[in-house]
Image (tube, helix red, strand yellow):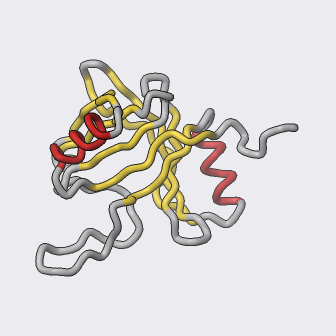
Amino acid sequence: MQSLTSGNCFHHVAIRAVDFDETVRFYTEGLGFRVHFPFSVPGRIDRAAFLDAGDGRFVEVFGQESTVQSEGRKRLPQEERTEGALLHFCLRAADTDASFARAIAAGGLARIEPVTRRLSEDPVVEVRIAFVTGPNGEVIEFLQSAQI
């Protein structure tokens, strides 16, 4: 039987950490994950890391000051929580552009059109990503990368 996913498979779930260090400790010490790739993007992502579940699937953890794709908006300090810990889920894509186009053709709403981003210089890590909103408001990222 041929897969209906066209080469897409689950890559990671992204969460915003209330306490970044405690979250990393919980996943590594408590659940046996390994810190695979910590990173930051000046002016956008204060702290982040891919935590490897051991099978090529990850939990991506973002610090409190990170600006990332999520449904809704980040709450102001004096407001009640308006977003959950789950920010988006990501599908590894063989071809981000084709996956994005297929999702849009199926009724998804474009959030971020396909773009290549460099996450770090040493080592050089580039990703081709795109984001869509699915029919239930879920945010889906397509990620194509040889490095992660």
Task: Please count the marks in the image.
Answer: 0
State the residue lying farthest toward the right.
Answer: 1
Residue 96 sits above or below residue 101 on the image: above
Q: Judge left or right: residue 95 versus residue 41.
A: right
- Residue drawn at (36%, 26%), measured in percent from left and top? 125
Task: Name the residue at the front extreme.
Answer: 30
Residue at the top extreme of this rendering: 123
71 displayed left or right of 113: left
**Quadrant in which the N terminus appears:** top right
Depth check, front residue: 9 or 125: 9
Q: In the displayed structure, does residue 8 sit left or right of residue 39?
A: right
Query: Where does the image place residue 15, in percent across and percent down from the top left?
Result: 33, 53
Q: Which image quadrant for residue 103? A: bottom right
Residues 43 and 70: in front is 70
Say which residue appears at 70% left-offset and 59% top-offset: 105
Residue 53: name its quadrant. top left
Rendered position, 104 above or below 45: below
Residue at the spot x=67%, y=66% of the render? 107
x, y percentage for residue 86?
39, 59
Residue lying at the far bottom of the rendered structure: 79
Please give left or right for residue 38 compared with residue 3 in the image: left
**Can you say whether 130 is above or below 78 in the image?**
above
Residue 101 position within the rendered picture, expressed as x and y whole percent measured from the top left: 65, 51
Residue 28 rendering spot, x and y as whole percentages: 28, 35
Along the viewing direction, whichever of 139 and 43 lies nearer the viewer: 139
Q: Look at the image and tell me in which quarter the C terminus lies.
A: top left
